Image: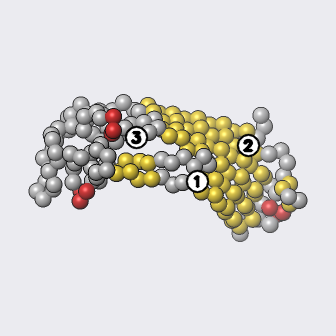
């Protein structure tokens, strides 16, 4: 189809620490449990995928204004669930899988003015997503309360951006 561009990418990661032992430096809050993470999976998603499509419309007039090019784009990103902590498996340590969708309309060189206008929507489905943050309390290592509702263990939820709608206007000199 003339004017259509489609893209897809994916990744699979099955990584574990092969030899990871450490001694916390002086002044560092000591972790609960062992400091040997050998054989522990990385706290990252095994599967990720992204998809996209752009279509440049065959007509170049929008709302009575001529333009050099009018393009519609859609992009999606999917990530599988993953463990949020490096300690032994616990169902409470799993993040959720999620998909984010972004949409965009670009109008180039509106009316021969060298001005470009774009409208966009990020996280179009307003998917509520949290990513784990493992800095802990006061820079400490894993707390014994992780996974217990209503307590503050090492993993905190960092919310990702909600739906955002906007426009951009640019001018070429």
Q: Residue at x 24, y 31 (%)?
A: 39
**Residue 162 placement (x, y as % from top left):** 54, 54
76 or 107, nearer to the observer = 76
Q: Earlier in the sequence, mark 3 or mark 1?
A: 3
Q: Does residue 33 appear left or right of residue 168 in this picture?
A: left
The image quarter containing residue 36 is top left
Q: Does residue 52 appear left or right of residue 12 in this picture?
A: right
Q: Earlier in the sequence, mark 1 or mark 2?
A: 2
Quarter occupied by the C terminus: bottom right
Q: Residue at x 52, y 38 (%)?
A: 78
- Location of residue 77 with respect to 117 vertically, above or below: above
Q: Which residue is drawn at 76% across and 65% down?
A: 114
Distance Cα–Cα, label 1 vs label 2? 23 Å
Distance Cα–Cα, label 2 vs label 3? 34 Å
8 or 48, nearer to the observer = 48
Mark identifier at residue 102: none
Asked if one can make out residue 43 in the rendered structure from this viewpoint, the answer is: no
Can you identify the residue that label 1 sits on? Answer: 163
Q: Which residue is drawn at 59% across and 38% down?
A: 51
Asked if the residue under mark 1 is in contact with the one under mark 3, i.e. CB atoms within 8 Å, the reply is no
Q: Which residue lies furthest to the left in this view?
A: 26
């Amino acid at each position: 189809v003339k004017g259509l561009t489609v893209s897809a990418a994916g990744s699979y990661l099955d990584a574990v620490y092969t030899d990871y032992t450490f001694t916390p430096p002086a002044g560092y809050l000591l972790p609960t449990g062992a400091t040997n993470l050998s054989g522990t999976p990385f706290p990252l998603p095994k599967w990720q995928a992204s998809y996209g499509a752009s279509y440049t419309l065959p007509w170049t007039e929008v709302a009575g204004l001529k333009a050099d090019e009018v393009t519609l784009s859609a992009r999606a990103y999917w990530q599988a669930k993953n463990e949020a902590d490096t300690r032994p498996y616990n169902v409470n340590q799993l993040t959720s899988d999620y998909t984010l969708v972004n949409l965009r309309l670009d109008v180039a060189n509106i009316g021969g003015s060298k001005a470009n206008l774009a409208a966009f929507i990020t996280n179009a489905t307003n998917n509520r997503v949290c990513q784990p943050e493992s800095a802990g309390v006061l820079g400490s290592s894993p707390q014994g309360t992780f996974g217990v509702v209503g307590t503050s263990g090492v993993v905190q939820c960092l919310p990702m951006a909600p739906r955002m709608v906007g426009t951009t206007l640019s001018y070429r000199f």
